[in-house]
Image (spheres, rainbow, N blue to C red):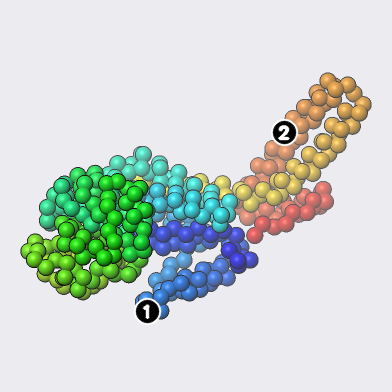
Amino acid sequence: MAHPAVRGVILLATCNRFELYLDATEFHSAVDTGRAMILSLTESDMPEVDPALVVHVGDGAVEHLFLVASGLDSVVVGEREIAGQVRLALADHDATASPGLRRLFQAALTTSKAVASSTMLGASGRSLAGVGLDLVADRFFPLEGRRVLLQGTGAYAGVVLAELLRRGVDEIRVYSGTGRADAFAASHSPSLPVTPGDLPHALAWSDVVVCCSGTGSQTLNADTLADARVGHTAPLPVLDLAMAGDVAPDASLLPQVVVIDLDEVSRNAPAEQADAVAAATELVRSGVATFSHVEGGRKADPAVTAIRAYVSAIIEAEIVAAERRHTPETADAVARSLRRVSNALLHTPSVRAAELARTGDLEDYRNALHTLFGIHVEADS
């Protein structure tokens, strides 16, 4: 936000995406600033981040967010959590979101709601956590009555916990490497917190482990798991839903541990019906077109405001004069008539300004205002 070209910022971070939305007056400098900031925050031993960054601009960025919010760009097509995460991102960034970004996110959520309510995509109610837990149930045992250790205390951990409860799991312990287990457990009954010292015991106690902290600390490594599972003959399913991975790669080599990561969840996500995806995609296209049409007309706002202010000043001067010359009743009638006539006269110029803004011809309109009335309107960036 310190960069002069950046008017607003919203960060959308979920279990498997990191997206930075910028409202900026300059394309290249804003993108370079965003890229430099992301690179400055990454750890030195992380893989190259720069080649993984993808940039969307203009209508392409609008369409991307609409697809994301509608669940069409998810690991599990049609997942139900993403709309809530988009809504949370907008709320969390109220201080940095520009009016344009607020309108963009609100329009994306409106389209997402339409997709959920009018297509089978929304009716399917699939979720990333749901598909992962389905894999555990299919390969090992039903989850009802099982004991689960949940690693993570963020917003997505709350989603996972709700899914576990829906499946009949009522013994849940929560571990956090950042010390937030107590607070999470206090607000998410019936879970119980696990201290760092009790982690080995919790791993030995568990029938299933679900990881979604996303801290990248990889607390669960081969040594920790091997020590905790001594004496257990049944394999321990570990569902790792974190983008960065909460489970160290060497853990998958243990014979008594089976790791199910995001890649495997993605490969096993059920394919949605083609007609549902097509219907949802058409709703997204329509939503993007509507948003672009309305936003294109908004470029005329400064010009419309200027001409309305010019006419209003003349009208108000005439009203003041009428109040001096006539009775209050007559002056009030004159004021109502003048305002009604001014609104009627300004309607067509206002509509025409919006049309010219959408076609890119607004400069002629601004020049006409300056030539005819001496009104100077700055071009919108």
Spot occupied by residue 72 in the image (x, y as percentages of width and height): 35, 53
| Label 1 Cα crowd, 10 Å radius (few <14 / some 14-19 / many 20+) | few
| Label 1 or label 2, whichever comes before in sequence order | 1
Direction from residue 296 to residue 151 in the image, left or right: left
Mark 1 or 2, closer to the camera: 1
* Residue 9 shows in this picture: yes
User: Residue 276 placed where, x, y %?
Assistant: 30, 45
Kindly tell me whether residue 276 is visible in this rendering: no
Q: Quadrant of residue 19?
A: bottom left
Q: Amino acid at mark 2?
A: Ala
33 relative position to 256: left or right: right
Quadrant of the image containing the N terminus: bottom right
Q: Residue at x 51, y 68 (%)?
A: 34
Q: Under tag 1, what secondary structure?
A: loop
Identified at 63% across, 47% down, the residue is 355
Residue 175 x/y as whole percent: 29, 59
The residue at 12%/52% (across/down) is 141
Where does label 2 land, which residue?
A: 344
Amino acid type for the residue under numbered disc 1: Asp
Disc number placed over residue 83 in the picture, else none: none
Circle 2 residues within 10 Å: few <14, some 14–19, many ≥20: few
Q: Quadrant of the C terminus?
A: bottom right
Residue in front for this viewpoint, 247 or 361: 247
Per the image, the residue denoted by label 1 is: 45
Q: Residue furthest front?
A: 197
Give the side of residue 140 with respect to residue 341, left or right: left
In which image quadrant can residue 156 be found? Answer: bottom left
136 left or right, relative to 9: left
Q: Position of residue 55 (x, y in %)?
A: 46, 66
Q: Given the current orientation, which residue lies at the most extreme bottom position? A: 45
- Residue toward you, 332 or 231: 231
Figure check: 359 above or below 52 = above
